[in-house]
Image (spheres, grey):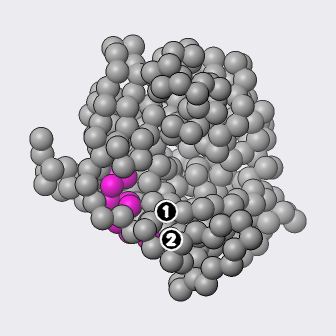
Amino acid sequence: MILVAGSANLDFVVRAHHIPAPGETVLGHEFRTFPGGKGANQAVACARAGAAATRMLCAIGDDAFAAPIEASLRDAGVELLAVRVAGTPTGTAFICVSDDAENAITVAPGANHCLLPHHLPSLEGVTHLLLQLETPLPTVTAFARAARAMHVTVVLNASPAQPLTEDLLSQVDILVVNEGELASITQCKGSIAEALGRLAVPYVVVTLGHRGSCARTPQGMQFQAAFPVSPVDTTAAGDTFCGTMVAALSQGKFMAEAMRYASAASALACTRPGAQGSIPLAAEVTDFLHQHAP
């Protein structure tokens, strides 16, 4: 069983020819809303693409924005553990997606900031705890510490980037970051290898966008190339990779195999619009890998 503890947002998405520059107004050509939030996206990826038993702990408001998020999680087979926060809006994200599939995102956390350490449920039967940084850092740290005490594998997707305490990092078994987040966390302007050398976390996975991903493990460095696709929307690509990888690890796959499976799921997600709605089924990921057999 995987427990994902983190954010849940409703995404307001505008598609436009390009992402506006500061002070620029751009005329969009499509608007839709999608269930999102890094935590909820990763929970859906665990359950749908990874076919793993998954629970999701999140804080949501008592407003209309919460309903599509709850429905999406349940439709994916995620067991929802919702903290309902009266008088506080559900988290929202405002996303501009360009015609070349790049995006710019602004998040209004809302109820996500009300997820507190005492909300953590029993960890009995949980093998992996997956965390992100769209909820309060003290809560993330408390959750990680509690999981480590119960010998649960702690996975932290350190996004959005912010300074991390040594206390938190000491509780993490697997750290997942992109290149910018790695540089921000380590304050290293050198190579990826130099930045990785500053982290004592046992496993560090770095997503590299269209170049794939790499991981520093106790057995050495590993690299996974990206699968070639024609992207439509990259909004949930990183979340799909992270959730699917954790699901694969929870099912006993080694890191290299888990990264390959996650890379395939992420590639498929890039070919569809939206966040959670873009995440493929496990059967689709398996078929895709058969088509791209080494």
Tell me where the magenta segment starts and ends, as one range: 265-273
Give the structural element (helix, strand or loop) at label 2: strand
User: Where residue 174 sits: x, y (%)?
Assistant: 50, 27
Q: Tell me which residue sits at (61%, 84%) in the image.
A: 27
Q: Tell me which residue sits at (72%, 45%) in the image.
A: 135
Mark 2 crowd level (few <14, some 14–19, many ≥20, 10 Å Cα) = some
Please say if 212 is above or below 22: above
Residue lying at the far right of the rendered structure: 87
Question: Which corner quadrant of the image does residue 215 belong to?
Answer: top left
Please say if 62 is above or below 8: below
Q: Is residue 8 left or right of residue 190?
A: right
Q: Tell me which residue sits at (38%, 61%) in the image.
A: 270
Q: Is residue 292 visible?
A: yes
Cα–Cα span, label 1 and label 2:
5 Å
Q: Which mark is residue 102?
A: 1
Q: Which mark is residue 98?
A: 2
In the rendered structure, are the residues bearing label 1 and label 2 in contact, judged by CB atoms less than 8 Å apart?
yes
Q: Tell me which residue sits at (25%, 54%) in the image.
A: 228
User: Where residue 81 sits: x, y (%)?
Assistant: 63, 51
Q: Is residue 266 magenta?
A: yes
* Residue type beneath disc 1: Glu
Please say if 50 is above or below 104: above
User: Where residue 134 sits: x, y (%)?
Assistant: 68, 47
Nearer-the-camera pick, 10 or 79: 10
* Residue type beneath disc 2: Ser
On-image quarter of the C terminus: top left
Q: Is residue 188 left or right of residue 293?
A: right
How many marks are shown on the rendered structure?
2
